[in-house]
């Protein structure tokens, strides 16, 4: 019997996991490498950050998935892929070096701080479940400290939130903090006057949610107003030093907690044995079959790939559906051993939510807003989360929070390293 070809998949996000589900494990040996031992669901990271959901309810361990169902038969190795040598066909992580026959790069993107790399140490981000948890702990810690603070000026400083980036993530996290201000403060933090908490959402262009219709942008602006979020359009952040956000037009804002959602760039993995350069956004330039141009047996899927076509001259939007559809098609063609079907993105629409009963959805033939959009948003997200236990947990959490506004998730879990070095808010 012929030895099976070994496919190594880097990244078990929407693209990597869907590829592994569809690839024929009787024809290929498949190894998934991911730095985390779980698949997660980025569209709901903002709910982890605002204590609306528990990180575990939107994450799914790879090893459990591999015991059964469509992923059964694949292997999972934990590791952060640092180097790929396409000449020798090897992938290197901090733990091992693996040989491949075919390589699928589905590593997604990371935060882009543009020309301000130092921001990494100063701002909060939402690109992973861990980053969202860090954000949640910082928000809760600030609320607890503010409720003890007797000085109104200090309290306002503690609760000065600025969100940079008016795309779906920025809008959603600003809306979620707005809901805390509007509905939670009175109930759970009675010592904090509402006006002491400020949320400013900053966007560089002239409207929020640029990828959606102008109607959606207008509606979202109105919803954010109801939630007491102050929106600043056409403002570009130039620096953030000593709690001062400076904009390129000279305006300054005081903020002790800046949440950065303004940009992404392809995950940096060093490539050897090739002089092929990445394209804009640090994405691998692929042909219409997701084969990286200029490399043999190496494919890129999802956010890290850049497929330019007449319909999408700047590449496809970095969305879950693009990643899923590309992954399924590549697996199908590798299973057949031929590349005959060019990728064609089927756009199912986009949506964003700004809190309970407030959402916008641009679907194929219809625009929804308000409660219908919000219910549609909830339904689509529920069916997309992996695992029945997760779906049920999320549904129960949402229904409970809808009727009671209470959440058992607003807990601060400090790490218990010995010796205890620092806690949030304490100076070293
Ligand atoms: C906060 C947020 C909200 C979003 N909301 C929406 C939304 O509402 N709708 C929508 O369609 N899209 C949304 N997106 C975009 C969507 O999540 C992405 O388009 C999608 O996840 C891309 O899938 P992917 O498989 O290419 O990458 P990812 O899902 O990012 O998966 C990449 C995987 O690779 C792993 N990895 C990365 N680098 C390495 C490495 N060097 N070594 C090993 N493993 C590595 C990561 O751990 C991860 O598991 C959102 C994204 C974010 C961050």
Image (tube, rainbow, N blue to C red):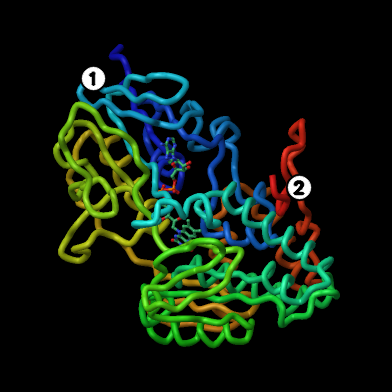
Q: In this view, does 420 lie to the left or right of 110?
A: right
Q: Quadrant of residue 420?
A: top right
Quadrant containing the C terminus is top right
For mark 1, give the secondary structure.
loop
Question: Which numbered tag is attached to residue 88?
Answer: 1
Residue farthest top in this picture: 1
Taking the spot 76% from the left edge, 57% from the top edge, the residue there is 409
Q: In this view, does 281 lie to the left or right of 233?
A: left
Q: Is mark 1 within 8 Å of ligand 1?
A: no
Viewer-side residue, 320 vs 89 = 89
Query: Within 10 Å of the Cα at label 2, are there few (<14), some (14-19), or many (20+) other Cα atoms?
Result: few
Residue 363 visible within the image? no
Taking the spot 57% from the left edge, 31% from the top edge, the residue there is 63
Residue at mark 2:
413
Percent x, y for residue 347?
34, 66
Q: Tell me: residue 7, above or below residue 383.
A: above
Q: Tell me: residue 365, above or below residue 238.
A: below
Residue 271 visible within the image? yes
- Disc 1 and disc 2: Cα gap in Å? 45 Å
């Amino acid at each position: 019997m012929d030895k099976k070809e070994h496919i190594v998949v880097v990244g078990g996000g929407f693209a990597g996991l869907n590829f592994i589900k569809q690839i024929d494990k009787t024809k290929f040996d498949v190894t998934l490498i991911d730095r985390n031992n779980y698949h997660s669901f980025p569209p709901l990271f903002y709910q982890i950050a605002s204590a609306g959901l528990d990180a575990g309810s939107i994450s799914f361990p790879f090893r459990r998935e591999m015991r059964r169902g469509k992923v059964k038969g694949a292997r999972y190795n934990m590791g952060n892929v640092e180097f790929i040598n396409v000449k020798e066909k090897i992938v290197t992580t901090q733990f091992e070096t693996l040989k491949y026959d075919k390589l699928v790069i589905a590593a997604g993107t990371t935060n882009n701080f543009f020309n301000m790399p130092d921001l990494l140490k100063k701002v909060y981000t939402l690109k992973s479940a861990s980053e969202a948890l860090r954000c949640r702990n910082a928000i809760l810690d600030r609320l607890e400290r503010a409720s003890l603070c007797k000085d109104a000026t200090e309290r306002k400083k503690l609760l000065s939130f600025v969100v940079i980036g008016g795309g779906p993530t920025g809008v959603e996290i600003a809306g979620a903090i707005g809901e805390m201000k509007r509905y939670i403060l009175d109930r759970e933090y009675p010592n904090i006057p509402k006006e002491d908490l400020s949320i400013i959402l900053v966007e560089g262009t002239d409207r929020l949610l640029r990828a959606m219709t102008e109607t959606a942008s207008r509606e979202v602006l109105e919803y954010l107003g109801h939630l007491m979020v102050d929106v600043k359009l056409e403002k570009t952040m130039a620096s953030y030093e000593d709690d001062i956000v400076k904009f390129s037009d000279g305006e300054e804002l005081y903020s002790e907690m800046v949440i950065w959602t303004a940009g992404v760039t392809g995950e940096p993995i060093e490539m050897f044995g090739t002089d092929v350069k990445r394209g804009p956004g640090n994405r691998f330039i692929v042909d219409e079959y997701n084969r990286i141009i200029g490399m043999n047996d190496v494919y890129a899927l999802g956010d890290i790939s850049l497929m330019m076509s007449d319909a999408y001259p700047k590449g496809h939007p970095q969305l879950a559906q693009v990643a899923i559809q590309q992954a399924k098609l590549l697996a199908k063609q590798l299973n057949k051993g031929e590349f005959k079907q060019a990728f064609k993105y089927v756009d199912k629409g986009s949506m964003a939510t700004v809190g309970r009963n407030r959402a916008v959805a641009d679907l194929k033939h219809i625009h929804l807003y308000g409660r219908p959009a919000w219910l549609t948003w909830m339904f689509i997200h529920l069916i997309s989360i992996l695992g029945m236990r997760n779906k049920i947990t999320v549904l129960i959490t949402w229904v409970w929070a809808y009727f009671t506004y209470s959440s058992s998730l607003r807990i601060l879990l400090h790490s218990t390293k010995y010796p205890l070095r620092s806690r949030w808010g304490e100076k070293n």
